[in-house]
Amino acid sequence: MAVFITDTCINCGACIDECPVEAIVDEDENPVGEELHYVYPDKCVECVGHHDVPACATACPTEGCIVWSEVAQSPKHRDDITDEMRSSKTPVVED
Ligand code: SF4
Ligand code: SF4
């Protein structure tokens, strides 16, 4: 359903242009008022059909800022990601 950007986001903007479905907005457009980039969960398709891994997380220069989030109403999600990985906010990419 979606990935989630955590408060370790440094607002570098590297993720926005990588998103194939324009699901990411910057801190100025964050709908919950946080000074962070934000992923709209109803738009994010976890890059299914576009990339092998979420492009935003690959582009992100931080360690583990973008994590798996719960499966909810959304077009697509990666079904190989377990509920536990989502509920524990496991980083999408660790480096
Ligand atoms: S996982 Fe893919 S579709 Fe979802 S926000 Fe990141 S780049 Fe966009
Ligand atoms: S690439 Fe990572 S640190 Fe940069 S704006 Fe996106 S989530 Fe934040």
Image (cartoon, grey):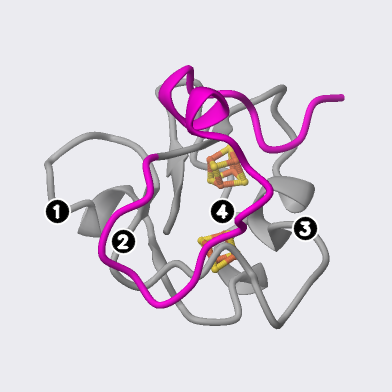
Q: Assign ligand 2 to one image quadrant.
A: top right
Q: What is the magenta segment's predominant secondary structure?
A: loop
With respect to residue 82, does 46 lie above or below? below
Q: Earlier in the sequence, mark 4 or mark 2?
A: 4
Element type at mark 1: loop
The amino acid at mark 2 is: Tyr
Spatial separation of the CA atoms under disc 4 and disc 3: 18 Å
Q: Residues within 10 Å of mark 3 (few under 14, many from 20)?
A: some
Q: Which residue is mark 1?
A: 31
The amino acid at mark 3 is: Val
Q: Which residue is mark 3?
A: 53
- Of residues 58 and 82, the one nearer the viewer is 82
Q: Residue at x 48, y 72 (%)?
A: 76
Q: Which residue is mark 2?
A: 40
Extent of the magenta region: 70-95
Q: Position of residue 63 (x, y in %)?
A: 72, 22
Could you tell whether 3 is left or right of 52 in the image? Answer: left
Element type at mark 3: loop
Spatial separation of the CA atoms under disc 4 and disc 2: 15 Å
Q: Earlier in the sequence, mark 1 or mark 4?
A: 4
Q: Earlier in the sequence, mark 1 or mark 2?
A: 1
Element type at mark 4: loop
Badge nearest the viewer, 1 or 4: 1
Badge nearest the viewer, 2 or 3: 3
Could you tell whether 27 is left or right of 56 in the image? Answer: left
The image quadrant that residue 36 belongs to is: top left
Does the residue tagged 2 have its C-beta within 8 Å of any atom of ligand 1?
yes
Mark 1–mark 3 CB contact (< 8 Å): no
Spatial separation of the CA atoms under disc 1 and disc 4: 17 Å
Spatial separation of the CA atoms under disc 1 and disc 2: 9 Å
